[in-house]
Image (cartoon, helix red, strand yellow):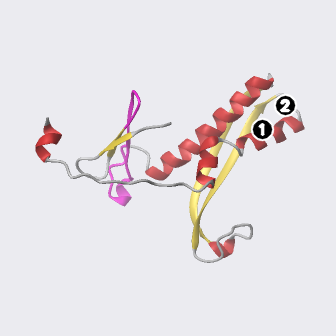
Amino acid sequence: MARVKVSSSEGIKQEIQAGPHRFFADEPPSAGGSGEGPSPYQLLLAAIGSCTAITMRLYANHKGWPLADVRVELEQKVIEASECDECQTPHGKLDSIEKRIYVVGDLAADQVDRLLAVARRCPVSLTLQREVRFVESITLESADAEEA
């Protein structure tokens, strides 16, 4: 189970608390933010990329393979469904995430192929590919309680 807390007081910049870690999400000035942190989509891509690299690294370590370095570059964009022959959505728009993986090491071709298969099964990517259920609520709190 994962938990984070996101807080906002003024502007677009958000403070994120993930366990003992604190950092910010923001939008660039061109989108009305201050540019003091990655955008939400950049955080999403970072989650996918880091999960992919960690999953590959753990697998290679388990197998004793000489994986020296993993680099994952990602790009998200919105495309027309008609531009995607293999997609199930026939009309409208959909999100496309391109993931390019670069590995360094004395690896055989079959090991590289297996690492790609493992990369496709990173838990964050699998979460996005499954049906996701959102349970949402909202509570109006007193401004006095926020200051305490």
Residue at the image point whose x is 78% and y is 38% from the top? 115
The image shows residue 110 at horizontal and vertical percentages of 88, 38
The tag on residue 91 is none
Q: Quadrant of the C terminus?
A: top left
Amino acid type, callout 2: Leu
The image shows residue 84 at horizontal and vertical percentages of 70, 69
Amino acid type, callout 1: Leu
What crowding class fits label 2: few (fewer than 14 Cα within 10 Å), some (14-19), or many (20 or more)? some
- Residue annotated with mark 1: 115
**Looking at the image, is 85 positioned above or below residue 130?**
below
- Residue annotated with mark 2: 107
Secondary element type, mark 1:
helix
Q: Is residue 69 visible?
A: no
Which label lies toward us, 2 or 1? 1
Marked residue nearer the N-terminal end (2 or 1): 2
Q: Is residue 18 magenta?
A: yes
Q: Disc 2, disc 1: CB below 8 Å?
A: yes
Q: Is residue 29 magenta?
A: yes
Q: Is residue 6 visible?
A: yes
